[in-house]
């Protein structure tokens, strides 16, 4: 049943400090709303359990992309349309650009924000695997100040995170050191567009004289949260890229992932596809290694 707009209070301020003061005065009572592409869908379905909404859309303090020599910082309120169009992000972080182009339709991308994608906490969300493969940091802000942590430590479980009720996502910070990495992102869904991920894998790695010298793997829809695959990475790190290593990595990945059966797919299918994607990435890495 559709939600009733009259059962929600909606307020807004034109500055971030005013929003933070409101969140701090009544922690947990106000639900931030940015693009609304998650929350308004929940409202339309009559399952928006948020009687008090506080607007973030249009706050200039959350809407910035800052490029320095060492990093690119993306404000929590930046839309995927603006991420997709940004030349420096496309050059340094092509996986994130690609993920941005997958988020719903073009219309959706004009409202959907990066913080909304992360805080919503879906294990199937498109941006998190790329952010994990790039070792992003997330910066949180409250009235009492900011804290910056590895994004890999943000999600605690299904739709659970370290975000406190008086905090907002201020920014994502991406270190600019992946240009010489082999980069991979593949999403498997029902269709090419407007499809929720069945399985996705993002990866960055370097290879030198056939040894894997750096590797980061992250996946969607294989756990109760966006997942960095640290155990599989550990099996690959420092190893020669040969059939035995590939086999060991596949075994490690199958042990590390714990997908679920749902209406889109089965756990067994997801496991197999995740292993196939890893195999595909390692084949590409091997080709690059032999060409180097
Ligand atoms: C038709 C359609 C297609 C979609 N397709 C995809 C897809 O292909 N891939 C995909 O990943 N997603 C998809 N989505 C989901 C959605 O568009 C994204 O998750 C989007 O990025 C959410 O951002 P938002 O600003 O709209 O979030 P909102 O709906 O405004 O908020 C979502 C959550 O984030 C919180 N929040 C928002 N901003 C902040 C902040 N700065 N700090 C703290 N908390 C915050 C809110 O309180 C809420 O809990 C789709 C949605 C629709 C409606």
Image (spheres, rainbow, N blue to C red):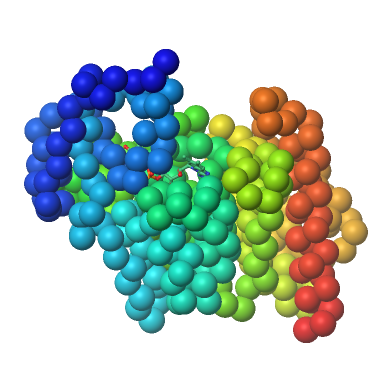
- Identified at 46% across, 37% down, the residue is 121
- Return the residue nearer the eye: 106 or 29: 106
- Identified at 65% across, 59% down, the residue is 185
Q: Residue 66 lies in what quarter of the image?
A: bottom left
- Identified at 49% across, 32% down, the residue is 157
Q: Position of residue 195 (x, y in %)?
A: 63, 43
- Give the tally of numbered discs: 0
The answer to whether residue 77 is seen in the rendering is: yes
- Return the residue nearer the eye: 37 or 212: 37
- Return the residue found at the far top: 1
In the rendered structure, the answer to whether residue 243 lies left or right of residue 231 reads right
- Return the residue nearer the eye: 270 or 47: 47
Q: Position of residue 151 (x, y in %)?
A: 44, 51
- Identified at 20% across, 37% down, the residue is 54
Q: Position of residue 220 (x, y in %)?
A: 61, 44
Q: Quadrant of the C terminus?
A: bottom right
Quadrant of the picture in which ligand 1 is shown = top left
Residue 88 drawn above or below residue 136? below
Residue 273 drawn above or below residue 79? above
- Return the residue found at the far right: 243
The answer to whether residue 231 is seen in the rendering is: no
Q: Position of residue 270 (x, y in %)?
A: 74, 37
Q: Quadrant of the N terminus?
A: top left
- Return the residue nearer the eye: 13 or 135: 13
């Amino acid at each position: 049943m559709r939600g009733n707009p009259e059962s929600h209070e909606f307020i807004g301020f034109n500055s971030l400090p005013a929003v933070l003061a409101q969140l701090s005065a009544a922690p947990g009572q106000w639900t931030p709303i940015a693009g609304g592409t998650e929350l308004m869908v929940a409202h339309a379905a009559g399952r928006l359990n948020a009687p008090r909404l506080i607007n973030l859309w249009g706050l200039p303090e959350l809407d910035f992309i800052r490029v320095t020599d060492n990093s690119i910082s993306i404000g929590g309120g930046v839309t995927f349309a603006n991420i997709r169009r940004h030349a420096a992000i496309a050059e340094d972080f092509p996986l994130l650009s690609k993920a941005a182009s997958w988020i719903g339709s073009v219309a959706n991308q004009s409202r959907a924000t990066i913080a909304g994608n992360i805080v919503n906490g879906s294990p199937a969300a498109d941006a998190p695997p790329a952010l994990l493969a790039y070792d992003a940091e997330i910066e949180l802000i409250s009235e009492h100040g900011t804290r910056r942590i590895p994004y890999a430590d943000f999600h605690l479980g299904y739709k659970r995170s370290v975000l406190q009720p008086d905090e907002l996502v201020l920014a994502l910070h991406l270190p600019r050191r992946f240009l010489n990495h082999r980069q991979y992102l593949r999403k498997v869904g029902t269709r090419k567009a407007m499809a929720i991920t069945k399985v996705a894998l993002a990866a960055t790695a370097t290879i030198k004289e056939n040894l894997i010298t750096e590797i980061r793997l992250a996946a969607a829809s294989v756990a109760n949260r966006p997942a960095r695959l640290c155990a599989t990475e550990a099996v690959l790190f420092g190893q020669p890229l040969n059939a035995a290593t590939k086999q060991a990595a596949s075994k490690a990945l199958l042990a590390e992932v714990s997908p679920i059966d749902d209406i889109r797919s089965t756990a067994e299918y997801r496991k197999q596809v995740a292993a196939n994607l890893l195999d595909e990435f390692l084949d590409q890495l091997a080709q690059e290694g032999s060409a180097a």
